[in-house]
């Protein structure tokens, strides 16, 4: 026969384990969410820096007056080939 003291100990251990599991899961989830937000912020900053660098390169590339973008209406293939031949 199981005494009432053993039953109290069993249910206390069971409930303690359940509450600890809930607490531990919340702690892990909060840490994961914080890391995910930090990573997203860092990724956005990295993309902004890359876009700024690409913009600077694009603006610096137009110093010689030759358009290298074939979609641009001012694109001239003969000038581009002449530039490539000279360099």
Image: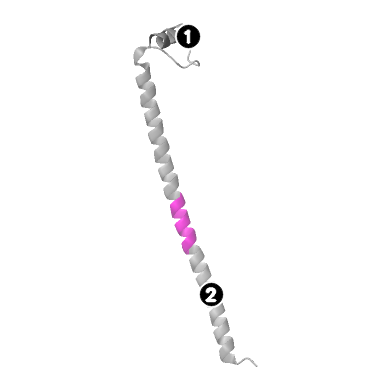
Dividing the picture into quadrants, the one containing residue 74 is top left
Residue 86 included in the magenta stretch of the image: no
The residue where tag 2 is placed is 17
Image quarter (top left, top right, bottom left or bottom right) of the N terminus: bottom right
Residue at position x 46%, y 63% in the image: 27
Dividing the picture into quadrants, the one containing residue 9 is bottom right
Residue at position x 52%, y 69% in the image: 21
Eyeballing the image, is 50 above or below 69? Answer: below
Residue at position x 48%, y 12% in the image: 73
For marks 2 and 1 on the same chain, the one whose residue lies earlier in the sequence: 2
Residue at position x 36%, y 21% in the image: 59
Dominant secondary structure, magenta = helix
Q: Which mark is residue 20?
A: none
Eyeballing the image, is 79 above or below 52? Answer: above
Q: Is residue 62 left or right of residue 23?
A: left
Q: Nearer the viewer, residue 35 or 81?
A: 81
Residue 31 included in the magenta stretch of the image: yes
Determine whether the residue tagged by mark 2 lies in a helix, strand or loop. Answer: helix
Residue 79 position, x and y percent, is 43, 7
Determine whether the residue tagged by mark 1 lies in a helix, strand or loop. Answer: helix
Residue 69 position, x and y percent, is 47, 17
Image quarter (top left, top right, bottom left or bottom right) of the C terminus: top left
Q: How many numbered tags mark residues here?
A: 2
- Which of the colour schemes (rainbow, by chain, secondary structure, one colour) is used? one colour
- Circles 2, 1 touching at the beta carbon (< 8 Å): no
Residue 65 position, x and y percent, is 37, 12
Q: CA distance from mark 2 to mark 1?
A: 74 Å
* Badge 1 density bin: few <14, some 14–19, many ≥20, Cα 10 Å: some
- Point out the residue furthest to the right here: 1
The residue where tag 1 is placed is 77
What segment carries the magenta color? Answer: 27-36
């Amino acid at each position: 026969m199981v005494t009432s003291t053993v039953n109290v100990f069993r249910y206390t251990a069971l409930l303690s384990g359940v509450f600890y599991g809930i607490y531990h899961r919340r702690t892990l989830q909060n840490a994961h969410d914080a890391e995910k937000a930090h990573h997203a912020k860092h990724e956005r900053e990295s993309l902004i820096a890359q876009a700024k660098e690409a913009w600077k390169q694009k603006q610096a590339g137009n110093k010689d007056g030759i358009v290298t973008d074939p979609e641009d209406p001012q694109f001239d293939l003969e000038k581009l080939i002449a530039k490539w031949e000279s360099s």
